Image: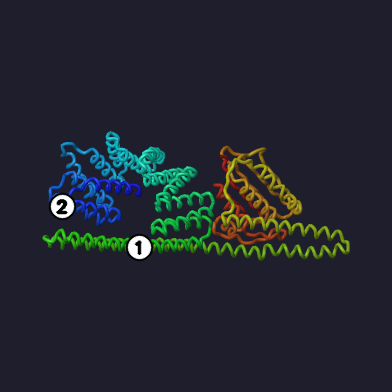
Amino acid sequence: MRQIFTLIISLLIANTTVYGQSAEMKKHFASIEAAEREQNLAKACSEYKAAINYCRQNNEDQHHLTNLLLGYCIILSYAGDYSKAIATLNEAAERNHRQPTPDKEIEAKIYMQFGVINFFQKRFDDALFYYRKSEAIAVSTKNKMGISIAKNNIANVYQKKGEYRQAIDSYRKCIKLQEELQDTATLANTYFNLGSCYEELSIQDRAKAYYKLAYSLAHTINDIEILSLSLIHLANIDAKRGEYSKAHNMLDEAEFSAKKAGLRQVLAEVYSKRTQIYEQKGDYRAALEVFKERQLLLDSILDEKLNLRTKELQIEHQTKEKEQQIALQNVKIKNRNRLLIIVMTVLIAGIVMIIVLLYLDKKLTRQRERLEQLNATKDKLFSIISHDLKSPAVAQQLATDVLVNKVKRANYTDILTLCKLLQDNTQQQVATIETLMNWTRMQTNKIKYTPLNIDIVPIIEEKTKLYSVAAQNKSLIINTRLPDSCIVYADPQMIGIVVQNIINNAIKFTPEGKTIDINCIDGDNDANISIVDSGAGMTPEQLAAIENPKGQVEVHFGTNGERGTGLGLALCRDLLEKNRSRLIVESRQQVGTTVGFTLRKN
């Protein structure tokens, strides 16, 4: 939208330099130009109407009147009064066609403005039709500026329609013309738009290159808005790549520039992007602080807009009173209508504020729930550290003390028993630490999902071998039914953790002398992996806790007193969900448990 307004202003300034013969008309044009530069729509409308009335009353050159009508239409379009804009534009078109020799440049501008009106109303195909007619006239008259504007607006339409490849082609065609015309302001916009298109296409390197060009050119011409917006988008690309430090540096520069230039809306975008980056990093406290700062800024901007709108209404009211002093009754009617508009504006603003407050309340509720979940995670972590890691360590200390005494007395049988006890406790502690580390990494999103085409058979064999000593210590028989090879599409690290935890649980809860079966069935589209034990089984409550993502599995002891963390199967469940699979658990108490899952072949 910013590119279009820039082009409109360039047209108006060009017009005001062309016409203006009498001193009175020169005053009108100076007032119009001042209002346009201030982007004060109400004042610009008032000045155009005064100039148009003067032209009609004093029989000024019809060329002047046509140009004034065109300029007035442009301001009405940007103000959103499309019906009045179209009526004014039709009058300008009729006056131009009534000329002995219709002005081709005016005709091109009229088509261009019909395109702009349709663009503002999101009728993009109609806008494209009028832009092309304007371009054709500009080509026939060899008006390079007209061609450049038309091509740029055509590219804007493609970009709005999501046809980014066509938009890119059109923008590239604009660049040569803009460079030839030395139209650096529009060129900076074009570079920025090209960056946006490539970013939408996820071609991050090219997007970054064009944003840098836009930044460099904006820096040269001191266009702080394009400079700041380019930095925001560069920060977004860096954040997606995990380069958070660079992203924050970019946002720091954008924030400094926006504050210095008083670009408060751009500053709000800086805060919005910084909030997103903090959320990506998991720093929700910092994200909340920046979010609050952004809301304060938006509230301030809204208040400023309301004040400005009130002033604009006051100016419009005063102007209309001067123009309609004779028709006092009409003025009263219009004042009542104006009051109704103000009331409706206030009501709509109130509704919008209520919606915003409801949205913020809902967002804060979600954040509070997330914080409660994190607190529960913290409590669970502390519980495991204080109990599960302490108990094996105490057992190891006691065993070591007794072992030293036995060595002194050279009782080798007891020493061997104590060594095995120490070995079991050490294995238990290592397994607990590994489970705890994996669970913590999962909770903090440190385990990255990186799927590959992998052979799962070596993974199962490796994890089975890892627990062979633990199985021998309990006289367990592990039967494996595996194919020679089974290629699946999954994350090898995650699947290794899943298999390891399931085998560990099976050994832990299977009595001495029993069997454990590890199976892998290689299907056409997927592979089914299952681990079957003949252990103690699970209660219905335990099975329900495993199925519930928010459920916490109770801590239970193995058949030889091995202490579980209550995290293993919950961790398996979450890791399998990352791999588009799910944990399937079937169990009967005192009979055994079957734990399985399915992985895709491609």
Q: Residue 437 placed where, x, y %?
A: 64, 56
Residue 565 numbered tag: none
Q: Nearer the viewer, residue 550 or 299?
A: 299
Q: Can the viewer see residue 594 in this picture?
A: no
- Horizontal side of residue 404 vs 362, given as left or right: right
What is the crowding at mark 2: few (fewer than 14 residues within 10 Å), some, or many (at least 20)? Answer: some
Could you tell whether 242 is left or right of 169 in the image? right
| Type of the residue with mark 1 | Met
- Which residue has dot 2 on it? 54
Q: Residue at x 57, y 40 (%)?
A: 601
**SS label for mark 2:** helix
Which quarter of the picture shows residue 326? bottom left
Residue 565 against residue 466 in the figure, above or below = below
Along the horizontal axis of the image, is 498 left or right of 347?
A: right
The residue sitting at 16% across, 44% down in the picture is 62
Q: Which mark is residue 353?
A: 1
Q: Secondary structure at mark 1?
A: helix
The quadrant of the rendering that contains the C terminus is top right
Kind of residue indicated by mark 2:
Tyr
> In the rendered picture of this protein, how many numbered marks are placed on residues?
2
Q: Residue at x 30, y 56 (%)?
A: 38
Query: Mark 2 or 1, which is nearer the eye?
Result: 2
